[in-house]
Amino acid sequence: MKTWTGLLLALLVVPTAAHAQEHRQQYVEQWPLSLSSAQSGAYRITLEPQIYRRAWSPQLADVQVYNAAGQALPSALLAPDQPLAQPPVQRELPWFVLPPLDAGSRNDLQLLTERDSDGRVRRVEARLGASAGAAQSAGWLIDASVLGQQPLAAVMLDWEAPAQPLQATVQVDASDDLRNWQQIDAQVPLVDLQRAGKRLLQRRIGVDRSVRYLRVLPNQGQQLPVLRGVLAELPPAAATIPWEWVALQPVKQGSGSFEFTLDGRYPVSRLDVATPDNSLVQWTAFSRDDPAADWQRRTAPWVAYQLEAGGGSRQQSAPQVLSGVTRDRYWKLVADPATTPAVPTLRVGYQPEVLVFLSQGAAPYALAVGSATAVRQEAPVGVLIEDLRQRNGPAWQPTLARFEGSPETLAGAAALQVPRDWKRWLLWSLLVLGVVVVGWLALSVLRQKPAA
């Protein structure tokens, strides 16, 4: 019985593994990955120029991470300026303890504050209205005026480990003058549970707006922990990844028009023009992804200049910022006037993107790239990253992975061949055959002599 069971499992597992390996053979090549830590559940890798040069898909959908068994790993492609591609910025905020209130008196709370000239709170006193009753628990006043007009994504609360399990809800209000309050959320959960050496924490309060003051009040019957500190979670700053530039020489020119061919699927978002000598020309840029398609204008006419001064100093116009990212392979510059003697070098600028993937199965991992048929399924890794940041702190981010060594050929150039649609050809063949048969029958009937 055990022998038959083992044989059945082998028959089920082998085809699955074989199918996984066969799926990876749809790519041109794969690049080995080196992990900076083998114990991380999520990794991030910055795409290098060779990946863009090998990619075939205009959406970069033919870039996929595989494990040693040839199984595709959940992954998502992120722009370098996306919040999930970098850790958020944190800053400590002042906070104050509010007096205990019952449910009937929380709206009668009047704060008597001592503030600096710039609005920062130095001291807080509270005066209750006539409906003040028995105390149940306390609340907190958070001073976010130190941030100025900078938006506040969320606040992270740090409290002492409670003696009893904590599972409470609080009401969060915002104000700009400590007099008029606007409710942000009436049921924000705060959780601190421990079991079997593990701890479950929920201490993040989402704000997503510019505020000066926050008021956190417990709902009726809720007990709050002893607060130790408050951290502001700010939106990430602009991406610090440096710009990469690819210089292109004209492959075709005439009458002030210069055409270029890009060798990869780079996420182009900036253009620049360089000339071998001093120049002052008005340019307009166009692009397309198919040599037979119409040109699409990517920039308005702009004046580009270049001045070579004595001593090797050089001054030139600023690069043009495109309205969006494009991965077109074919580009064209049109000069005004068309009689310009300058032969330009087109420089396309981009910021490398980040691929985030989850570790599943055994290492080593490899990044497969280049396929006319395979399509990566975007996984909702953003949900996982946000959850891990809530558990491990806002500064947490996926562990770094790097390319290591030379690429390994998989299917080679055959992976870029678009397969023929045999079903469509067969259908058209049957339709043509049917028309021929009907026509032949009609001619046969017409040629027959009429009966006597």
Image (cartoon, rainbow, N blue to C red):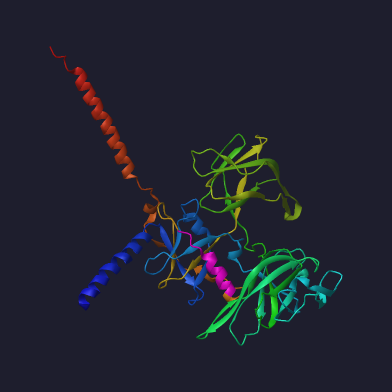
For the record, the magenta segment spans 377-390
Residue depicted at x 58% and y 76%: 392
Instruction: Find out whether residue 384 is within the magenta segment.
Output: yes
Image position, residue 340 (x, y; %): 66, 37
Quadrant position of residue 223: bottom right
Q: Main secondary structure of the magenta part?
A: helix
Q: Is residue 137 above or below residue 280?
A: below
Q: Residue at x 75, y 68 (%)?
A: 147
- Does 44 sit left or right of 4 as displayed? right
417 or 227, nearer to the observer: 227
Depicted 426 relative to depicted 3: above or below:
above
Residue 45 seen anywhere in this rendered image of the structure: no
As for residue 423 lying within the magenta part, the answer is no
Indicate the quadrant where residue 97 lies: bottom right
Quadrant of the image containing the N terminus: bottom left
Above or below, 55 against 431 in this view is below
Q: x%, y% of residue 33?
A: 47, 68
Where is residue 214? Give x, y as percent. Answer: 73, 70
**Quadrant location of residue 244?**
bottom right
Which is more toward the observer, 315 or 65? 65
Instruction: Choose between 279 and 383: the one closer to the eye.
Output: 383
Question: Residue lying farthest top?
Answer: 452
Residue 262 visible somewhere in the drawing: yes
At which x and y percent is residue 404?
A: 47, 68
